[in-house]
Image: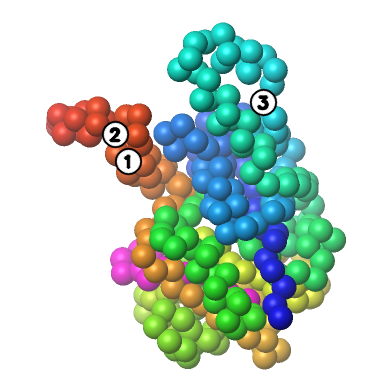
Amino acid sequence: MSKKIRKAVIPAAGFGTRFLPQTKAMPKEMLPIVDKPIIQYIVEELVGVGIEDIIIVTGYHKRTIEDHFDRPSLELIENLRNGGENKLPLIEQIENIANLANFIYVRQKGPYGNGTPLLNVLSIIGDEPFIYTWSDDFIKSEPSRFRQLIDIYKEYQCTVLGGIRVRQEEDFEKYGFAGGKKIKDGLIDVRTLIEKPGKKNAPSDLATVSGFVFTPDIFEYIQRARENLGEGDELYYNDALKLMLSDGRRVVAKEIKGGKYFDTGNKLEYMKTIVEFGLEHEDIKGEFRAFLKGFKLD
Protein backbone atom coordinates (compact mmCIF):
# COMPACT_ATOMS: atom_id res chain seq x y z
CA MET A 1 0.00 0.00 0.00
CA SER A 2 1.41 3.39 -0.99
CA LYS A 3 2.19 6.01 1.62
CA LYS A 4 -0.16 8.96 1.70
CA ILE A 5 1.32 12.21 0.45
CA ARG A 6 1.09 14.53 3.45
CA LYS A 7 3.93 16.99 2.86
CA ALA A 8 4.86 19.62 0.32
CA VAL A 9 7.97 21.71 -0.23
CA ILE A 10 7.89 25.22 -1.71
CA PRO A 11 11.26 26.79 -2.59
CA ALA A 12 11.02 30.52 -1.91
CA ALA A 13 14.54 31.81 -1.35
CA GLY A 14 15.07 33.70 -4.62
CA PHE A 15 15.59 37.45 -4.82
CA GLY A 16 12.90 38.20 -7.41
CA THR A 17 15.22 40.47 -9.36
CA ARG A 18 12.82 40.70 -12.31
CA PHE A 19 10.48 42.73 -10.10
CA LEU A 20 12.96 45.14 -8.57
CA PRO A 21 12.62 47.65 -7.02
CA GLN A 22 9.32 46.26 -5.68
CA THR A 23 10.98 43.08 -4.42
CA LYS A 24 13.70 44.94 -2.54
CA ALA A 25 11.46 44.79 0.54
CA MET A 26 8.61 42.47 -0.54
CA PRO A 27 9.23 38.85 -1.56
CA LYS A 28 8.01 38.09 -5.08
CA GLU A 29 5.90 35.27 -3.60
CA MET A 30 3.89 37.94 -1.77
CA LEU A 31 3.03 39.97 -4.84
CA PRO A 32 -0.78 40.16 -4.95
CA ILE A 33 -3.11 38.70 -7.53
CA VAL A 34 -5.89 41.21 -6.88
CA ASP A 35 -6.09 40.76 -3.08
CA LYS A 36 -4.29 37.50 -2.37
CA PRO A 37 -0.54 36.79 -2.57
CA ILE A 38 0.66 34.36 -5.20
CA ILE A 39 1.97 31.85 -2.67
CA GLN A 40 -1.42 31.60 -0.95
CA TYR A 41 -2.99 30.26 -4.14
CA ILE A 42 -0.40 27.46 -4.15
CA VAL A 43 -0.90 26.75 -0.44
CA GLU A 44 -4.69 26.57 -0.79
CA GLU A 45 -4.37 24.18 -3.71
CA LEU A 46 -2.07 21.94 -1.66
CA VAL A 47 -4.45 21.94 1.28
CA GLY A 48 -7.26 21.02 -1.11
CA VAL A 49 -5.61 17.65 -1.82
CA GLY A 50 -4.94 16.82 1.83
CA ILE A 51 -1.47 18.23 2.38
CA GLU A 52 -0.92 18.72 6.11
CA ASP A 53 2.69 19.95 6.39
CA ILE A 54 4.01 22.69 4.11
CA ILE A 55 7.74 23.32 4.24
CA ILE A 56 8.75 26.69 2.79
CA VAL A 57 12.46 27.07 2.08
CA THR A 58 13.25 30.76 2.51
CA GLY A 59 16.07 33.27 2.73
CA TYR A 60 16.83 36.02 5.22
CA HIS A 61 14.65 38.48 3.28
CA LYS A 62 11.45 36.39 3.34
CA ARG A 63 10.09 37.08 6.83
CA THR A 64 6.94 38.54 5.28
CA ILE A 65 5.91 35.06 4.13
CA GLU A 66 6.13 33.74 7.67
CA ASP A 67 4.13 36.70 8.97
CA HIS A 68 1.42 36.16 6.36
CA PHE A 69 0.76 32.56 7.42
CA ASP A 70 0.95 33.42 11.12
CA ARG A 71 -1.92 34.56 13.33
CA PRO A 72 -3.09 38.12 12.63
CA SER A 73 -2.07 40.74 15.15
CA LEU A 74 -4.48 41.76 17.90
CA GLU A 75 -4.25 45.33 16.61
CA LEU A 76 -5.49 44.28 13.17
CA ILE A 77 -8.35 42.26 14.64
CA GLU A 78 -9.38 45.16 16.86
CA ASN A 79 -9.24 47.56 13.94
CA LEU A 80 -11.53 45.33 11.88
CA ARG A 81 -13.98 44.89 14.76
CA ASN A 82 -14.24 48.65 15.06
CA GLY A 83 -14.74 49.03 11.32
CA GLY A 84 -18.38 48.03 11.21
CA GLU A 85 -20.36 44.94 10.22
CA ASN A 86 -18.92 44.83 6.70
CA LYS A 87 -15.40 44.25 8.12
CA LEU A 88 -16.31 41.26 10.29
CA PRO A 89 -16.06 38.61 7.51
CA LEU A 90 -12.46 39.71 7.00
CA ILE A 91 -11.59 38.61 10.53
CA GLU A 92 -12.56 35.00 9.84
CA GLN A 93 -10.82 35.15 6.49
CA ILE A 94 -7.44 36.23 7.84
CA GLU A 95 -7.66 33.98 10.91
CA ASN A 96 -8.23 30.98 8.64
CA ILE A 97 -4.95 31.60 6.81
CA ALA A 98 -2.90 30.49 9.82
CA ASN A 99 -4.96 27.31 10.12
CA LEU A 100 -4.57 26.15 6.54
CA ALA A 101 -1.70 23.76 7.37
CA ASN A 102 1.29 23.17 9.59
CA PHE A 103 3.91 25.61 8.29
CA ILE A 104 7.59 24.82 8.64
CA TYR A 105 10.27 27.29 7.58
CA VAL A 106 13.80 26.32 6.60
CA ARG A 107 16.58 28.73 5.65
CA GLN A 108 18.24 27.73 2.39
CA LYS A 109 21.89 26.72 2.65
CA GLY A 110 24.11 25.36 -0.08
CA PRO A 111 24.95 26.00 -3.72
CA TYR A 112 22.73 28.16 -5.91
CA GLY A 113 20.04 26.33 -7.85
CA ASN A 114 16.55 24.85 -7.56
CA GLY A 115 17.89 21.53 -6.28
CA THR A 116 19.37 22.95 -3.10
CA PRO A 117 16.05 23.19 -1.21
CA LEU A 118 15.84 19.40 -1.51
CA LEU A 119 19.07 19.09 0.44
CA ASN A 120 17.63 21.35 3.13
CA VAL A 121 14.42 19.37 3.79
CA LEU A 122 15.76 15.79 3.96
CA SER A 123 15.44 15.50 7.73
CA ILE A 124 11.87 16.82 7.64
CA ILE A 125 10.56 14.71 4.76
CA GLY A 126 12.26 11.46 5.73
CA ASP A 127 11.12 8.43 3.73
CA GLU A 128 7.81 9.85 2.49
CA PRO A 129 6.74 10.87 -1.01
CA PHE A 130 6.05 14.60 -1.24
CA ILE A 131 5.05 17.42 -3.56
CA TYR A 132 7.72 19.85 -4.77
CA THR A 133 6.23 22.97 -6.29
CA TRP A 134 7.26 26.48 -7.23
CA SER A 135 6.02 29.61 -5.53
CA ASP A 136 5.44 31.81 -8.58
CA ASP A 137 3.58 29.67 -11.09
CA PHE A 138 0.56 27.42 -11.03
CA ILE A 139 -1.99 25.64 -13.19
CA LYS A 140 -5.63 26.43 -12.61
CA SER A 141 -7.42 23.23 -13.52
CA GLU A 142 -10.27 20.93 -12.62
CA PRO A 143 -9.43 18.54 -11.09
CA SER A 144 -6.48 20.40 -9.62
CA ARG A 145 -2.97 19.70 -10.93
CA PHE A 146 -1.97 18.23 -7.57
CA ARG A 147 -4.96 15.89 -7.59
CA GLN A 148 -3.97 14.73 -11.06
CA LEU A 149 -0.35 14.18 -10.01
CA ILE A 150 -1.29 12.32 -6.83
CA ASP A 151 -3.68 10.04 -8.74
CA ILE A 152 -0.87 9.09 -11.12
CA TYR A 153 1.50 8.50 -8.20
CA LYS A 154 -1.02 6.17 -6.57
CA GLU A 155 -1.27 4.19 -9.79
CA TYR A 156 2.43 3.98 -10.71
CA GLN A 157 4.26 4.43 -7.37
CA CYS A 158 7.05 6.56 -8.82
CA THR A 159 8.15 10.16 -9.32
CA VAL A 160 5.61 12.14 -11.34
CA LEU A 161 6.47 15.33 -13.22
CA GLY A 162 3.70 17.79 -14.03
CA GLY A 163 3.66 19.15 -17.56
CA ILE A 164 1.93 21.31 -20.14
CA ARG A 165 1.88 21.14 -23.93
CA VAL A 166 3.53 24.10 -25.59
CA ARG A 167 3.19 25.40 -29.12
CA GLN A 168 5.06 28.70 -29.30
CA GLU A 169 8.63 28.43 -30.53
CA GLU A 170 9.93 30.73 -27.78
CA ASP A 171 8.53 28.40 -25.12
CA PHE A 172 11.05 25.73 -26.12
CA GLU A 173 13.75 28.13 -24.91
CA LYS A 174 12.06 28.70 -21.52
CA TYR A 175 11.26 25.29 -20.05
CA GLY A 176 12.62 21.79 -19.59
CA PHE A 177 11.12 19.02 -21.71
CA ALA A 178 10.53 15.32 -21.13
CA GLY A 179 10.78 12.64 -23.79
CA GLY A 180 9.98 8.94 -23.65
CA LYS A 181 7.49 6.19 -24.39
CA LYS A 182 3.78 6.98 -24.34
CA ILE A 183 1.93 5.04 -21.64
CA LYS A 184 -1.48 6.50 -22.40
CA ASP A 185 -2.95 9.82 -23.43
CA GLY A 186 -1.12 12.59 -21.59
CA LEU A 187 1.33 10.29 -19.78
CA ILE A 188 4.83 9.21 -20.78
CA ASP A 189 7.53 6.98 -19.33
CA VAL A 190 10.40 9.44 -19.18
CA ARG A 191 13.65 8.48 -20.89
CA THR A 192 15.24 11.89 -21.29
CA LEU A 193 15.03 15.39 -19.80
CA ILE A 194 16.44 18.39 -21.64
CA GLU A 195 16.51 21.96 -20.33
CA LYS A 196 15.64 24.74 -22.80
CA PRO A 197 16.42 22.64 -25.87
CA GLY A 198 14.93 24.84 -28.58
CA LYS A 199 12.17 23.48 -30.77
CA LYS A 200 14.47 21.50 -33.09
CA ASN A 201 16.12 19.59 -30.26
CA ALA A 202 13.14 19.11 -27.96
CA PRO A 203 12.29 15.44 -27.25
CA SER A 204 8.57 16.31 -27.20
CA ASP A 205 6.23 19.25 -26.72
CA LEU A 206 5.62 18.34 -23.05
CA ALA A 207 7.24 20.98 -20.85
CA THR A 208 7.79 19.94 -17.24
CA VAL A 209 6.60 22.86 -15.14
CA SER A 210 4.88 23.95 -11.99
CA GLY A 211 4.83 20.95 -9.64
CA PHE A 212 5.99 17.38 -9.10
CA VAL A 213 5.53 14.36 -6.85
CA PHE A 214 8.95 13.12 -5.72
CA THR A 215 9.62 9.77 -4.13
CA PRO A 216 12.11 9.88 -1.22
CA ASP A 217 14.91 8.38 -3.33
CA ILE A 218 15.29 11.86 -4.85
CA PHE A 219 17.43 12.70 -1.80
CA GLU A 220 20.02 10.04 -2.59
CA TYR A 221 20.36 11.42 -6.10
CA ILE A 222 20.42 15.11 -5.21
CA GLN A 223 23.27 14.35 -2.82
CA ARG A 224 25.09 12.53 -5.61
CA ALA A 225 24.45 15.43 -7.96
CA ARG A 226 25.97 17.80 -5.43
CA GLU A 227 29.09 15.65 -5.17
CA ASN A 228 29.46 15.91 -8.96
CA LEU A 229 29.41 19.73 -8.96
CA GLY A 230 32.44 21.69 -10.02
CA GLU A 231 33.48 24.90 -8.35
CA GLY A 232 30.84 27.57 -8.93
CA ASP A 233 28.35 25.14 -10.52
CA GLU A 234 24.65 25.38 -9.74
CA LEU A 235 22.58 22.47 -8.40
CA TYR A 236 19.34 21.61 -10.21
CA TYR A 237 16.69 19.04 -9.40
CA ASN A 238 16.96 17.82 -13.00
CA ASP A 239 20.53 16.74 -12.22
CA ALA A 240 19.11 14.29 -9.68
CA LEU A 241 16.34 13.12 -12.02
CA LYS A 242 18.85 12.34 -14.76
CA LEU A 243 20.89 10.23 -12.34
CA MET A 244 17.70 8.41 -11.34
CA LEU A 245 16.93 7.65 -14.98
CA SER A 246 20.47 6.41 -15.61
CA ASP A 247 20.03 3.97 -12.71
CA GLY A 248 16.77 2.67 -14.18
CA ARG A 249 14.46 4.37 -11.68
CA ARG A 250 11.04 5.06 -13.10
CA VAL A 251 9.91 8.64 -13.72
CA VAL A 252 6.70 9.53 -15.52
CA ALA A 253 5.49 12.87 -16.87
CA LYS A 254 1.81 13.78 -16.70
CA GLU A 255 0.18 16.42 -18.85
CA ILE A 256 -2.13 18.44 -16.61
CA LYS A 257 -5.53 18.36 -18.27
CA GLY A 258 -8.41 20.79 -18.18
CA GLY A 259 -6.53 23.85 -17.07
CA LYS A 260 -4.43 26.89 -17.84
CA TYR A 261 -0.85 27.60 -16.86
CA PHE A 262 -0.05 30.90 -15.15
CA ASP A 263 3.59 31.99 -14.86
CA THR A 264 3.78 35.01 -12.57
CA GLY A 265 7.58 35.01 -12.51
CA ASN A 266 7.93 37.81 -15.05
CA LYS A 267 6.23 41.19 -15.36
CA LEU A 268 4.17 40.60 -18.49
CA GLU A 269 2.75 37.23 -17.43
CA TYR A 270 2.11 38.57 -13.95
CA MET A 271 0.05 41.44 -15.38
CA LYS A 272 -1.88 39.04 -17.63
CA THR A 273 -2.67 36.91 -14.58
CA ILE A 274 -3.97 39.89 -12.63
CA VAL A 275 -6.28 40.85 -15.49
CA GLU A 276 -7.70 37.33 -15.84
CA PHE A 277 -8.26 36.92 -12.10
CA GLY A 278 -9.67 40.44 -11.85
CA LEU A 279 -12.30 39.54 -14.43
CA GLU A 280 -13.41 36.65 -12.19
CA HIS A 281 -13.22 38.41 -8.82
CA GLU A 282 -16.63 38.73 -7.19
CA ASP A 283 -15.98 42.20 -5.75
CA ILE A 284 -14.77 43.94 -8.89
CA LYS A 285 -15.42 41.87 -12.00
CA GLY A 286 -18.36 43.92 -13.27
CA GLU A 287 -16.72 47.32 -12.94
CA PHE A 288 -13.34 45.97 -14.04
CA ARG A 289 -14.84 44.47 -17.20
CA ALA A 290 -16.57 47.78 -17.97
CA PHE A 291 -13.30 49.62 -17.43
CA LEU A 292 -11.42 47.35 -19.83
CA LYS A 293 -14.14 47.66 -22.47
CA GLY A 294 -13.93 51.43 -22.29
CA PHE A 295 -10.16 51.56 -22.19
CA LYS A 296 -8.75 53.17 -25.30
CA LEU A 297 -5.30 52.24 -26.55
CA ASP A 298 -3.27 54.75 -28.56
Residue 218: horizontal and vertical position, in percent?
72, 73
User: Which of the numbered marks, if any, corresponds to residue 72?
Assistant: 3
Mark 2 and mark 1 lie on one chain; the one further toward the N terminus is: 1
Sequence-first tag of 3 and 1: 3
Q: Secondary structure at mark 1?
A: loop
Q: Given the image, on which type of amino acid does mark 3 rest? A: Pro
- Is residue 88 visible in the rendered image? The answer is yes
Q: In the rendered image, is residue 9 in sight? A: no
Q: Is residue 161 magenta?
A: yes
The quadrant the N terminus occupies is bottom right
Residue under circle 1? 280
**Residues shaded magenta:** 159-173
Is-magenta flag for residue 298? no
For label 3, count other residues whose C-alpha is less than 10 Å away and answer few (under 14), some (14-19) or many (20+). Answer: some
Distance of mark 2 from mark 1, alpha carbons? 6 Å
Query: Few, some or many C-alpha atoms within 10 Å of disc 1 (few <14, some 14-19, many ≥20)?
Result: some
Badge 2 element: helix
Snapshot quadrant of residue 68: top right
What's the residue at 55%, 73% (across, down)?
Answer: 151
Give the residue type that dot 2 points to: Lys
Q: Is residue 28 above or below residue 122?
A: above
- Residue 246 lies, with reference to residue 121, above or below; the image says below
For label 2, the residue is 285
Place of residue 73 in the rendered image (x, y in percent of width and height, measured from the top left)? 69, 21
Dot 2, crowdedness within 10 Å: few (<14), some or many (≥20)? some
Q: Is the Cβ of the residue at disc 2 closer than 8 Å to that at disc 1?
A: yes
